[in-house]
Amino acid sequence: MRDKYKLVGPIYDWLSAFYSGKSIHRCKVAMLDKLRPGDRVLFAGVGHGRDAVHAARLGADVTVVDLSATMLKKFQANLEREGIVDVRIRQVHSDIMLVEEFEQYDMVVANFFLNVFEQDMMLRVLAHLIRLGRPGAHIVVGDFSFPTGNVFSRVVKTLYWYGAVGFFWLFAGNAFHNIYNYPEWMKKFGLQVGEQKHYKLLLLDCYWSVIGQKPA
C-alpha cells in the first residue's frame, strides 16, 4: 500500500493549524457531542486523530482507519507523548474500501477525507461509509464548506480552497477538483441531513461539519 503522506504526514496537524488556526480542529469535533457512552464510531482517514481521542474520552468505542502508515505512526506517537493511556482505540492500517464491517457503527466520521478523491471515487467512498453505519447511524463529514454568500465571499473561499487542494495535489498526489457540496450528495444517498455547523476564518465561513442520518 503506497503511503502518499510520507512527506506531509509528520506535519499534518501543524499545516492545519497554520492554514486555519483552530477552525479545522473545531470542525472535526463539532458533531461528537451526539455520541453516547458505548457507541461504536469509525473515523475514516484519521490523520493525527485528536478528534478520535476526543470521542474515546466521551466513552465511545473507537476504530480508526488510515491507509497511511505515517499517519498512524504519528497518531500513536501523539498518544504516547501526551501520556494518553485512559482510552482504548482500535487502529486499522487499511484502504477504507477494504473495511467490510457493514452496519456495525453508530457513527461514521469522514473529516477532511473525502476531498482527497476525484468526484466519482468520492461518491463510491461515501456510499461505502454509509454502508458501514447501522440503520439510524449518523454519518458526519467535516471539510471545506461549499462557497455561498456574495461574489466576493465565494471567490475568496474558492481561492482559499485551491490553495489547500493544490498543496496536497503537489506534495501528496491527492485529486485536484472543485469544492464538493456534501449535503446534496448525502441527500441523494438517502440520508436525512441535519445540523450543519460552520467555522470561520477571517469572518468567512470556510469550514463546515455536516451530519446525516441513515433511515432506521
Image (spheres, rainbow, N blue to C red):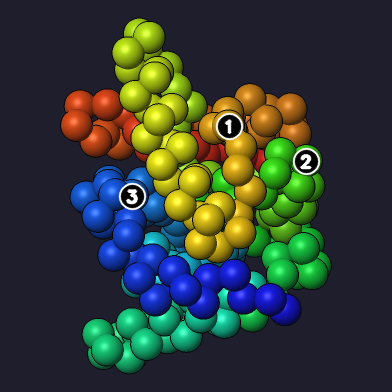
Query: Is 153 rendered above or below residue 55?
Result: above
Residue found at x 36% / y 53%: 29
The residue under the point 44% across, 22% down is 147
| Rendering coords of residue 149 (x, y %) | 37, 12
Q: Is residue 162 left or right of residue 156?
A: right
Q: Residues within 10 Å of mark 3 (few under 14, many from 20)?
A: many
Residue placed under numbered mark 1 in the picture = 178
Q: Is residue 165 visible?
A: yes
Real-space Cα separation, disc 1 to disc 2, in angstroms: 13 Å
Q: Which mark is residue 120?
A: 2
Q: Is residue 63 left or right of residue 129?
A: left
Asked if the residue under mark 1 is in contact with the one under mark 3, i.e. CB atoms within 8 Å, the reply is no
**Is residue 64 something one can see in this rendering?**
no
| Image position, residue 64 (x, y; %) | 55, 72
Q: Secondary structure at mark 2?
A: helix
Where is residue 124 shown, x and y percent of the image?
78, 47
User: Which numbered marker is on residue 24?
Assistant: 3
Pick whichever, 121 or 191, lies toward us: 121
Amino acid carrying mark 2 in the image:
Asp
Spatial CA distance of label 3 from label 2 is: 25 Å
Work out how far the residue at label 3 is from the one at label 1, CA to CA, in angstroms: 19 Å
The type of residue carrying mark 3 is Ile
Q: Earlier in the sequence, mark 3 or mark 1?
A: 3
Nearer the observer: mark 1 or 2; the answer is 1
Which type of secondary structure does the marked residue at label 1 adopt?
A: loop
For the residue marked with disc 1, what is the amino acid? Asn
Label at residue 167 = none
* Quadrant where the C terminus is found in the figure: top right
Please state the horizontal and vertical placement of residue 106, each as a whole percent of the image. 60, 57
Within 10 Å of disc 1 (Cα), the crowding (few <14, some 14-19, many 20+) is some
Classify 37 as above or below 18: below
